[in-house]
Image: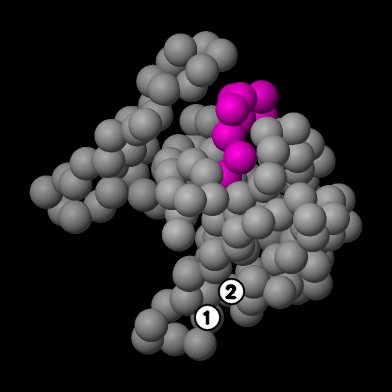
Amino acid sequence: TYPFLRSPHQMSVVQVAMPQSRAVCHATHADAPSCLQIGHTEGATTLMFRHLPRKYTARDLLAALEQNVTRAGVDFVYVPWDRNSPYNMSFAFVNFTDVQTARMISAVMQGAVWPNDPRMRRMKIMPAIVQGFAANL
């Protein structure tokens, strides 16, 4: 598990140990954890997708995922919405049913442009802090 701390400015600070390199990364919520790269998803089934188009719903995200994986390979999708606007918060969490599917999605979709996004944002995918279906409920 990864420690989750609060800074004096109420920004989330995350300490992430990268399994392959054993390097430690400190990052604020705004870019957390940008130091994780493809290949450092070893053992992860829950991935965080960043730079999500603001109008995307969970259904839109599932449609994008279904270009590479069947719906049976996904058992949890969470797209948090901004309470003060009609838009999502530009990130989402997806749990895959196995590690191999999560690795494949990360390798295939990392850096790709989101479908139907007029701003042509690129996907940024990293392991979520909270891992697994049950832990995310």
Q: Within the image, what quadrant is residue 126 found in? A: top right
In which quadrant is the N terminus drawn?
top left
Bin the neighbour count of mark 1 within 10 Å (Cα to Cα): few under 14, some 14-19, many 20 and up: some
Distance of mark 1 from mark 2, alpha carbons?
Answer: 5 Å
Amino acid on which the number 2 mark rests in the picture? Arg
Bin the neighbour count of mark 2 within 10 Å (Cα to Cα): few under 14, some 14-19, many 20 and up: some
Amino acid on which the number 1 mark rests in the picture? Tyr
Q: Residue furthest top?
A: 21
Identify which residue is drawn at 79% across, 60% down. 71
The mark that comes first in sequence, 1 or 2, is: 2
- The main secondary structure of the magenta stretch is loop
Identify which residue is drawn at 28% across, 34% down. 3
Residue 108 horizontal/vertical position (percent): 81, 41
In which quadrant is the C terminus drawn?
bottom left
Can residue 37 be seen here? The reply is: no
Span of residues in magenta = 38-46
- Local secondary structure at mark 1: loop
Residue 110 horizontal/vertical position (percent): 72, 42
Q: Nearer the viewer, residue 51 or 45?
A: 45
- Residue at which label 1 appears: 87
Can residue 27 be seen here? The reply is: yes
In the image, taking residue 137 as reference, residue 12 lies left or right, namely left
Residue 83 horizontal/vertical position (percent): 38, 82
- Residue at which label 2 appears: 54
Look at the image and name its color scheme: one colour
Q: Are marks 1 and 2 in contact (CB under 8 Å)?
A: yes
Vertical order, 71 against 26 (above or below): below
Q: Residue furthest left?
A: 8
Vertical order, 91 against 34 (above or below): below
Q: Residue furthest front?
A: 134
Q: Nearer the viewer, residue 130 or 7?
A: 130
